[in-house]
Image (cartoon, rainbow, N blue to C red):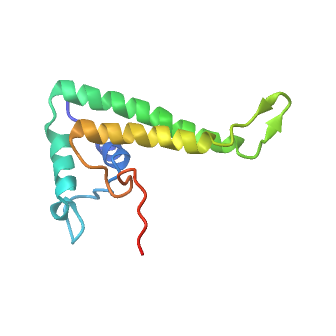
């Protein structure tokens, strides 16, 4: 079982790597990023059991991503009757989502991509 083009795009996106495009052309592509090349190798060469694990990650990550998006619908409510909004909900959902994204990177043996970062804060002076 090989990943579909949509699944491969989701794997790249969830791991924090940029879009692949139509293929290696120009000056931006997997050829210039060792980790990106490793990601492409993994996408195309996992065993069936490993592909199943990644497919399960994709299902979970799509659910978590949807929950982040849906939490935006409640940002304007501070309190409704007895219900009170968790003011940290969006931050907590994003942290959970990013944790699972990093777990997928860990399973694939990759550093998190540029869009995901490594989970630390850096101050540059």
Residue 81: where, in percent of width, then height?
86, 30
| Picture quadrant of residue 100 | top left
Q: Residue at image x 16%, y 34%?
A: 46
Q: Quadrant of the C terminus?
A: bottom left
Observer-nearest residue: 93 or 74?
93
Relative to residue 40, is residue 12 drawn left or right? right
Q: Residue at image x 21%, y 72%?
A: 27
Residue 120: where, in percent of width, then height?
40, 53
Q: Is residue 4 visible?
A: no
Q: Name the outermost residue toward the right.
A: 81
Relative to residue 88, is residue 49 drawn left or right? left
| Picture quadrant of residue 117 | bottom left
Q: Is residue 17 visible?
A: yes
| Picture quadrant of residue 28 | bottom left
Q: In the rendered image of this protein, does residue 81 appear above or below residue 29?
A: above
Relative to residue 105, is residue 81 drawn left or right? right
Residue 77: where, in percent of width, then height?
77, 42
Observer-nearest residue: 34 or 8?
34
Q: How many marks?
A: 0
Q: Residue at image x 20%, y 61%?
A: 33
Q: In the rendered image of this protein, does residue 36 appear above or below residue 53?
A: below
Residue 47: where, in percent of width, then height?
14, 29
Q: Quadrant of the N terminus?
A: top left
Q: Residue at image x 28%, y 32%?
A: 54
């Amino acid at each position: 079982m090989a990943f579909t083009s949509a699944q491969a795009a989701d794997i790249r996106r969830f791991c924090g790597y940029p879009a692949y495009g139509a293929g290696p052309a120009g000056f931006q592509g997997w050829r210039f990023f060792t980790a990106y090349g490793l990601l492409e190798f993994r996408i195309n060469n996992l065993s069936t059991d490993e592909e199943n694990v990644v497919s399960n990650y994709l299902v979970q990550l799509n659910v978590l991503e949807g929950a982040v998006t849906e939490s935006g619908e409640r940002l304007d409510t501070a309190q409704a009757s007895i219900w009170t909004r968790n003011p940290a909900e969006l931050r907590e959902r994003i942290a959970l989502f990013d944790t699972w994204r990093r777990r997928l990177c860990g399973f694939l043996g990759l550093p998190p991509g540029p869009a995901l970062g490594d989970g630390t804060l850096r101050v540059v002076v």
